[in-house]
Image (tube, grey):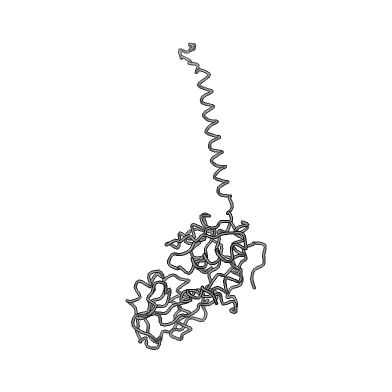
Amino acid sequence: MSNDPQGFVIEKRPKWKWITGVGGVVVLVVAIVVAVTLRGEEENKGFTSSLKIAYATSTPAQKAIIDYVNDEIAPDYGITLEAVGYGDGDAIYRSVDEHKTAGHFTAHRYWTEEVNKKLGTHNFATDAEIYTWVGSIYSPRYRDLNDIPDGAKVSIPQEPSVQAQQLQVIANLGFITLDPGVDPLFVSLRDVTSNPRNWKLTPIELTSQPRVYQDFDVTFGGGEGVDPSWLITTVPLPRAYSPPLTVADDSRTDPNIVKLYDALRDPRLQRWLKEGDGQQYNLVIAAVPTDQPLAHPELYVPLDPGTERQQ
């Protein structure tokens, strides 16, 4: 300590305190660098050959596909698959976006676009079509569509892309007419131009339809969980609604994702759905109707960004 001519007291800090302070800063900087590096490595870490595939617990048929591919096809591609069920559809998209799961095939590409916009996720719908949905028509009161009276209460899905599916089914059966100027993939209730039977079309959340179907004269939509005795008929949906393998956009070139893509495109899967044990799920899903042309071929983008699209 020394006296300043102005009367101030100047105290010199011991050298060891400066060294300790500098040392603490260095340790802190090193810790930050290590943390950032580890986080970057974790984010950039690719998938191993053991892949988790997300599925909707409300649709056991999706798990059956994963299990079949794992047992009969995946070994030929050097990968193994584990089915991971989710009760919340949004959680499936987030799990893929965050690389917690390698992919899913729970919805068609138009629905995926809607979910990506809603959640801010980046799920990429490939051109590897896995199956097509089967539209179920069921009723607690009638066994024939022609018996459904005028003014009947009719349940249809609330979700836009699924609603468009079922409106097409109803229109194809001749019960309503849709505006021909609207793309069939995006029609909604406002596009119904004629309803000669005066059916009261009521949108209901898809997963809730089976729980409330007894409140309606007839339901067009998902039949999972409905008493089979109430089923009137099933209608395979157009190819446009075939769910594809969907992966994180930033994992498209991952070697093990490429193997997954190739495994799911193996023709044995479609044969299993057409002729094998996959037939037990034919009230919910069916093989992809590849004889139908693609509605919007420009949307069927291969996994590899450098590969040409389907025509």
Towards the viewer: 165 or 60: 60
Q: Is residue 262 above or below residue 175?
A: above
Residue 246, picture quadrant: bottom right
Towards the viewer: 139 or 201: 139
Q: Residue furthest left?
A: 215
**Which residue is pictured at 37% across the width and 70% down the height?**
208
Towards the viewer: 150 or 141: 141
**Which residue is pictured at 59% across the width and 66% down the height?**
73
Figure quadrant of the C terminus? bottom right
Q: Position of residue 127 (x, y in %)?
A: 59, 68
Q: Position of residue 236 (x, y in %)?
A: 50, 78
Q: Is residue 50 left or right of residue 189?
A: right
Towards the viewer: 37 or 269: 269
Q: Is residue 149 left or right of residue 109?
A: left
Q: Position of residue 199 (x, y in %)?
A: 37, 82
**Count of numbered tags:** 0
Q: Can you see residue 200? A: no
Q: Can you see residue 295? A: yes
Q: Position of residue 27 (x, y in %)?
A: 53, 31
Q: Is residue 138 above or below residue 24?
A: below
